[in-house]
């Protein structure tokens, strides 16, 4: 597969209402943007992580979307165990591009930020990029921007479901730019670093659009 992606979705009590609906819409938009043979997993979390969608081809869209719509908010918030679960699963995924997208308001445990930064560094060292989507009006921008910076992904912030398809097709209407490039650590430098998941999806979409444009019209 070209892409292996894990969506890490906050379903804690602080995400009740519009924020969780945004997260569900964002995850569905991401699943629909992938090719049928790309791999997707969904890890939902409150105080504990749960793999609500195990790693599987994105062609199983109906099953994936049904599981996403069943998410309900409640409980505390622990981001680190969920992001760590995503890291473990992507470590054994044979995909050219591996990516984590964290969807949350960023209100985790007080001791989590340093541990999350170390984990984002470790993911990047293993060739996995990390992007963040801050949902709702009250988000921890500092934490989410920092994680995306260290994971060499992008950070997005939105309160509008209309922005979500653009986010996952690489055309964000509300985003922070990617961080300056730096040379990957030794393990990642032994292989060509793949493009981010969003750019790969954008490339596939553009190619398909161009092919349709070149196709002769029926007489």
Image (spheres, rainbow, N blue to C red):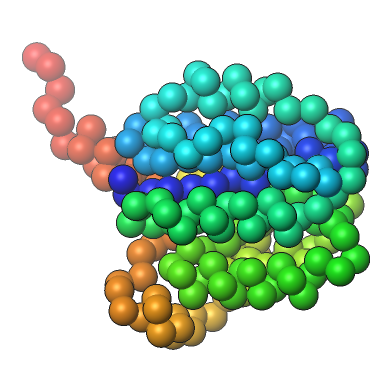
Quadrant that contains the N terminus: top left
The answer to which of 88 and 67 lies nearer the viewer is 88
Residue 81 in the image: state x and y as whole percent.
Answer: 71, 55
Quadrant that contains the C terminus: top left
Residue 4 in the image: state x and y as whole percent.
Answer: 43, 48
Residue sitting at 62 percent across and 69 percent down? Answer: 120
Residue sitting at 33 percent across and 56 percent down? Answer: 96
Residue sitting at 89 percent across and 52 percent down? Answer: 138
Residue sitting at 39 percent across and 34 percent down? Answer: 57
> In this rendering, would 175 be left or right of 198?
right
Residue 15 in the image: state x and y as whole percent.
Answer: 84, 40
The residue positioned farthest toward the left in the image shown: 219
Viewer can see residue 104: yes
The residue positioned farthest toward the top in the image shown: 219
Residue 164 in the image: state x and y as whole percent.
Answer: 62, 41
The answer to which of 38 and 200 lies nearer the viewer is 38
Name which quarter of the figure residue 213 lies in.
top left
The answer to which of 1 and 218 lies nearer the viewer is 1
Q: Number of marks in the image? A: 0
Viewer can see residue 173: no
> In this rendering, would 53 be left or right of 96?
right
Residue 106, relative to residue 21: is it above or below?
below
> In this rendering, would 67 be left or right of 135?
left
The answer to which of 144 and 8 lies nearer the viewer is 8
Residue 1, relative to residue 122: is it above or below?
above
Name which quarter of the figure residue 192 lies in.
bottom left
């Amino acid at each position: 597969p070209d892409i292996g992606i894990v969506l890490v979705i906050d379903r804690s009590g602080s995400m009740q209402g519009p924020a969780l609906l945004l997260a569900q819409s964002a995850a569905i938009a991401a699943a629909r943007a992938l090719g049928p043979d790309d791999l997707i997993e969904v890890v939902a979390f409150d105080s504990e992580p749960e793999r609500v969608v195990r790693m599987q081809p994105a062609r199983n869209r109906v099953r994936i979307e049904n599981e996403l719509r069943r998410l309900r908010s409640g409980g505390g918030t622990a981001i680190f165990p969920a992001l760590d679960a995503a890291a473990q699963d992507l470590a054994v995924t044979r995909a050219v591009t591996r990516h984590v997208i964290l969807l949350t308001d960023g209100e985790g445990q007080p001791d989590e930020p340093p541990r999350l930064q170390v984990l984002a560094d470790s993911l990047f060292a293993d060739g996995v990029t990390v992007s963040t989507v801050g949902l709702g009006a009250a988000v921890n921008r500092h934490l989410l921007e920092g994680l995306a910076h260290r994971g060499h992904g992008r950070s997005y912030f939105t309160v509008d479901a209309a922005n979500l398809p653009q986010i996952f097709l690489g055309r964000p209407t509300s985003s922070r730019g990617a961080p300056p490039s730096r040379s990957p650590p030794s393990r990642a430098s032994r292989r060509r670093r793949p493009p981010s998941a969003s750019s790969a999806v954008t490339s596939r979409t553009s190619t398909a659009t161009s092919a349709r444009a070149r196709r002769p019209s029926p007489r």
